[in-house]
Image (tube, coloured by chain):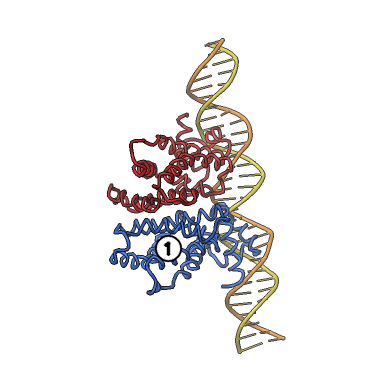
Chain colours: A blue, B red, C orange, D yellow
Amino acid sequence: MKEKEQKIMEAALQLFVEKGFHGTSTAEIARTAGVATGTLFHYFKTKEELINSLYLYTKESMFSQMKEHFEVDKSLKENLKGLWSKFIYFSMENPYKFQFILIFHTSPYITSLTKEQLETQTDALLTVYKKGVHDNELKEVPFEIMIEYFWGNIISTINYFNKYPEKLGDKNLDQAFELFWDGVSL
Amino acid sequence: MKEKEQKIMEAALQLFVEKGFHGTSTAEIARTAGVATGTLFHYFKTKEELINSLYLYTKESMFSQMKEHFEVDKSLKENLKGLWSKFIYFSMENPYKFQFILIFHTSPYITSLTKEQLETQTDALLTVYKKGVHDNELKEVPFEIMIEYFWGNIISTINYFNKYPEKLGDKNLDQAFELFWDGVSL
DNA sequence: TACTAAACTGACTAATCAGTCTAATAATAA
DNA sequence: TTATTATTAGACTGATTAGTCAGTTTAGTA
């Protein structure tokens, strides 16, 4: 990716999160990125294309860190906590990216295409869930309820640490995870 | 409230949820409500005042249904489930209102004043939580974690039923609540 | 060195924005 | 009835918007 393209995306990411999609003008993005408006439209044909590109970029940036497979010598709980923690740490280290994904996901901008791409990302979790149920470690509830519960818990944990950053530590992380785990486990 | 004022608020509520604050023009709100733009600005001095009025109105509309006190002859679990269910049903019956509260709450529009008003709303929950801990029914984790967990669970349950409205029923509601309850209870 | 294509610029435009203003109408009171 | 006030209308304004375009700079190639 070219340097100016990168700068445009970084500026757009920050401004979109702080001021919303419509609240941010292309002129402001270009100014913040230190480029001319023409340059912005050279790389992204429309504002909407910029928004969608940014979504795919941030989502890829997040899920690329979640790729590692489960370690067979560890328990389901340990493995789940590993994945759960990765999401927490990613969002603490990349607050704008995480916030952007959240905002975008509940906005009218999301196209059915990008929605589909997100769905497939849950396949790995489905495998874990099925194994957990089979081994009598997890409750047998509709998978879609389980996945919403998983995400909801991650998001609320992140909200907590965003509100009270000074509380970030192993003890509170463990307690937040225990709430989640005791909910899903048998 | 005058009829046209009401119409303006209803139109604004729907459009804000569907297209965002900046994405919705005052002209479109007036057109949808069937009034002239002048009428809109007669009732609301600015667009921002309209947004804030709408927030206070929807929030009041939601919390007025949650006012009932806990019933002493019922268990903590039953009481909590009653409150939890009320939120679920409110959002299913008033999807725009609930969505608007969510969007507004994570937007730059929210002022410190309205933020304070929301905080006090959690006082009732704090009392319940303290009693639950004292009676050895609830885990002793920081209250702020508990409250985020409570909200997160409600929101993810609502997300689930919004995605799959045909799944709305006592069985799935019970299962979703059991996830929550098993997380918080000892 | 000369040539070419891509990267880049910023002034510009048509459309749209929030908000104003004057005037018309409806409601109420004397 | 007449006077007064609250309500409604929509054309209008200056500012801002997304996007264009004609031209300049940069980088690679032969």
Q: Residue at x 36, y 41 (%)?
A: B79
**Total numbered labels:** 1
For the view shown, which residue lies furthest in the front direction?
Answer: B135
Q: Is residue B121 above or below residue A161?
A: above
User: D14 or D17: nearer the eye?
Assistant: D17
Q: In the drawing, does residue C5 fall left or right of residue B152?
A: right
User: A178 or B33: nearer the eye?
Assistant: A178
Q: In the drawing, does residue B100 fall left or right of residue A76?
A: right
Q: Is residue A136 visible?
A: yes
Q: In the drawing, does residue A131 fall left or right of residue B32?
A: left
Q: Quadrant of residue B43?
A: top right
Q: Is residue B89 visible?
A: no
Q: Is residue A61 above or below residue A185?
A: below
Q: Which residue is label 1 attached to?
A: A114
Residue A31 lies, in percent from the top left, at: 65, 60
- Give the residue type that dot 1 points to: Thr
Q: Chain of mark 1?
A: A
| Within-10-Å neighbours for mark 1: few <14, some 14–19, many 20+ | some
Residue B35 lies, in percent from the top left, at: 48, 35
**Which type of secondary structure does the marked residue at label 1 adopt?**
helix
Residue A184 lies, in percent from the top left, at: 35, 58
Residue C5 lies, in percent from the top left, at: 58, 77
Q: Residue at x 47, y 44 (%)?
A: B101
Q: Is residue A144 above or below residue B123?
A: below
Q: In the drawing, does residue B161 fall left or right of residue A24?
A: left
User: A60 or A181: nearer the eye?
Assistant: A181
